[in-house]
Image (cartoon, rainbow, N blue to C red):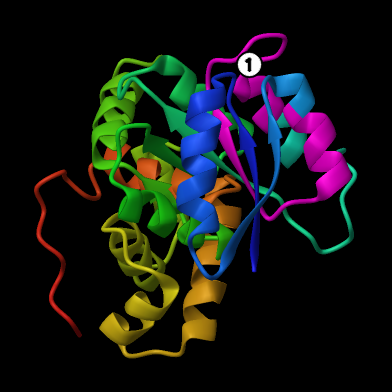
Amino acid sequence: MIRILLADDQPLIRSGLAMLLDAEPDMQVVGEADDGAAAIAEARRLLPDVVLMDVRMPVLDGVAATREITGDTFRAEPGHAIRVLVLTTYNEDKAVREALRAGASGFLLKDAAPFELTAAVRAVYHAEAWLDPAVAKGLLADFKGAAASAIPDRAELSRITPREREVLILLAHGLTNQQISHHLVVAESTIKTHISRILTKLGIHERAQAVVTAYRTGLVGPGDPLPPRR
């Protein structure tokens, strides 16, 4: 069962999300928060698997709350990772970029279809990245004009092997670990190892950051087709 904490300052939004998520057989909304500070407190108390985090909230915004919850000093049970899925109204909101740096695992627009919401929650729960296409487009435009960021540049791609580069490309196309393993005809455990090494070599912490790196460096373009199966 995927345990979910909802963090949004609008009661109607929280109510609608709760109805959608609780209707899924593998999901349960275990708590709600109406500001970032409350989200941190409830995450510490409830230890959910996924936090649906609004970017803009009073008292403490979603970016700061995400940074705290995903940080090394956050006290959670050993081996239990709380992942954050950011909800945003604007697909070019600079706060989304900051949330990525803060450790968010995915981004979803609030007007997304219900099936996208549940798919995003499951992906983030399984330690996979989820980037709404419209959000990704805004991120890419934002990163292009940024003078400095936590995202590696093209020169840093030389650190990864050709096979790791293939894995990164498929990751950027939105494939899960299982789909990448089928595409490259290797064990899923091998794909997990490749992804772990990619993150380590590039000095990043989340799959979402790896996806943005692939697009920002030109390794993958918005209209590129999926590479042929090997």
- Name the residue carrying label 1: 61
Q: Is residue 75 left or right of residue 19?
A: right
Vertical comparison of 186 with 63: above or below: below
Q: Depth check: 97 or 146 in front? A: 97
Q: Position of residue 54 (x, y in %)?
A: 54, 26
**Does the magenta portion include 48?**
yes
45 up-or-down from 177: above or below: above
Q: Residue at x 55, y 65 (%)?
A: 126
Q: Residue at x 53, y 74 (%)?
A: 192
Q: Nearer the viewer, residue 168 or 202?
A: 168
x and y percent of residue 213 in the render? 38, 42
Q: Is residue 34 left or right of residue 182?
A: right
Query: Badge 1: few (under 14), some or many (20 or more) residues near its Cα, within 10 Å?
Result: some
Left or right: residue 166 versus residue 151 is left
Q: Which residues are magenta?
A: 39-66
Residue 172 x %, y %: 31, 55
SS under mark 1: loop
